[in-house]
Image (cartoon, helix red, strand yellow):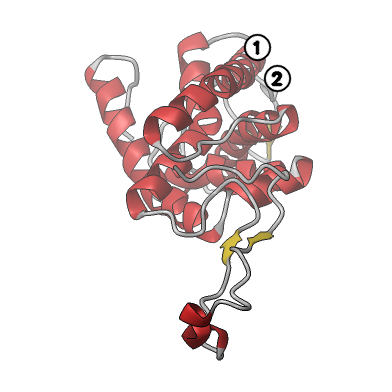
């Protein structure tokens, strides 16, 4: 089972018994000795399979995936922009409310806390580590997701897009492009350990697929007015 090194994740060397004085192993002592095993820094093994990388990426992003859906379910309330306009267009629109934003962030934080409790058991069951969430990491993911959605609404209004109008690319990745940098800022060490480049790549590729799929399901269930 590939698990975190007990020294907190720093690189360590594991050396076997000395070969000196063992004539049966002279062939290895003459420059052919195999290098010692190296434990890489961080909880994520350097030799994760593609499936393991996808699982870790999905698990790590769950506190950022949930807030927008929770905000939709909460719905209503006072708009964040208070009805103000910029030029002849609303700053954000009625779809971005204080209640929805607060509900989304709280939902992400609650899910991160639950996943942290479940992480040891899930790691044991899977045979590889899934991350627990530091408080600041959870905040960065949840709040970053909502801020990304708010930023997307602002950009849509500036581009003349109405509420609910499709904006390919921005709709699918708005919460990713804000939640990841914010998490990196608030919980730098945790972010560096969890979001390796291969995990980030999986997040960028898989997130649009998940976003479209869940929105289509929500549309079919009558929870959304548009399937995007």
For the point 37% across and 37% down, which residue is it? Answer: 211
Mark 2–mark 1 CB contact (< 8 Å):
yes
Q: Position of residue 21 (x, y in %)?
A: 61, 78
Mark seen at residue 82? 2
Crowd rating for badge 2 (residues with CA inside 10 Å; few <14, some 14–19, many 20+): some
Q: Quadrant of residue 154?
A: top right
So how many labels did they put on this image? 2
- Compared to residue 220, the image places residue 205 above or below, namely below
192 and 161: which one is in front? Answer: 192
Q: At 59% from the left edge and 23% from the top edge, which residue is drawn?
A: 116
Q: Residue furthest left?
A: 220
Q: Looking at the picture, tell me which residue is in the foreground, 225 or 183.
A: 183
Locate residue 80, reporting x and y percent. 68, 22
Say which element carries label 1: loop
Q: Which of the two residues, 108 or 81, is positioned nearer the viewer here?
A: 108
Instruction: Describe the element under mark 2 as helix, strand or loop.
Output: loop
Which residue sits furthest bottom? Answer: 30
Rendered residue at 59%/43% (across/down): 4
Q: Where residue 152 sits: x, y (%)?
A: 56, 41
Give the CA distance from mark 2 to mark 1.
7 Å
Front-most of residues 227 and 143:
143
Query: Mark 1 — residue?
Result: 78
Q: Which quadrant is home to the C terminus?
A: top left
Q: Give above or below for 192 relative to 109.
A: below
């Amino acid at each position: 089972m590939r698990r975190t090194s007990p020294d907190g994740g720093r690189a360590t060397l594991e050396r076997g018994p000395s070969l000196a004085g063992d004539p049966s192993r002279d062939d290895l002592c003459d420059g052919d000795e195999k290098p010692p095993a190296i434990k890489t820094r961080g909880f994520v093994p350097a030799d994760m399979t593609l499936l393991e990388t996808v699982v870790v990426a999905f698990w790590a992003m769950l506190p950022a995936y949930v807030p927008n859906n929770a905000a939709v379910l909460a719905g209503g309330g006072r708009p964040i922009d208070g009805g103000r306009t910029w030029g002849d267009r609303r700053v954000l629109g009625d779809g971005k409310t204080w209640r929805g934003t607060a509900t989304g962030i709280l939902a992400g934080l609650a899910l991160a806390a639950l996943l942290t409790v479940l992480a040891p058991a899930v790691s044991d069951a899977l045979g590889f580590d899934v991350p627990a969430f530091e408080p600041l990491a959870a905040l960065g993911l949840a709040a970053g997701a909502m801020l990304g959605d708010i930023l997307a609404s602002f950009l849509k209004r500036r581009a003349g897009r109405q509420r609910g109008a499709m904006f390919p690319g921005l709709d699918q990745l708005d919460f990713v492009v804000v939640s990841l940098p914010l998490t990196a800022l608030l919980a730098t060490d945790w972010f560096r350990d969890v979001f390796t480049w291969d995990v980030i790549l999986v997040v960028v590729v898989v997130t649009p697929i998940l976003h479209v799929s869940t929105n289509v399901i929500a549309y079919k269930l009558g929870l959304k007015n548009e399937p995007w």
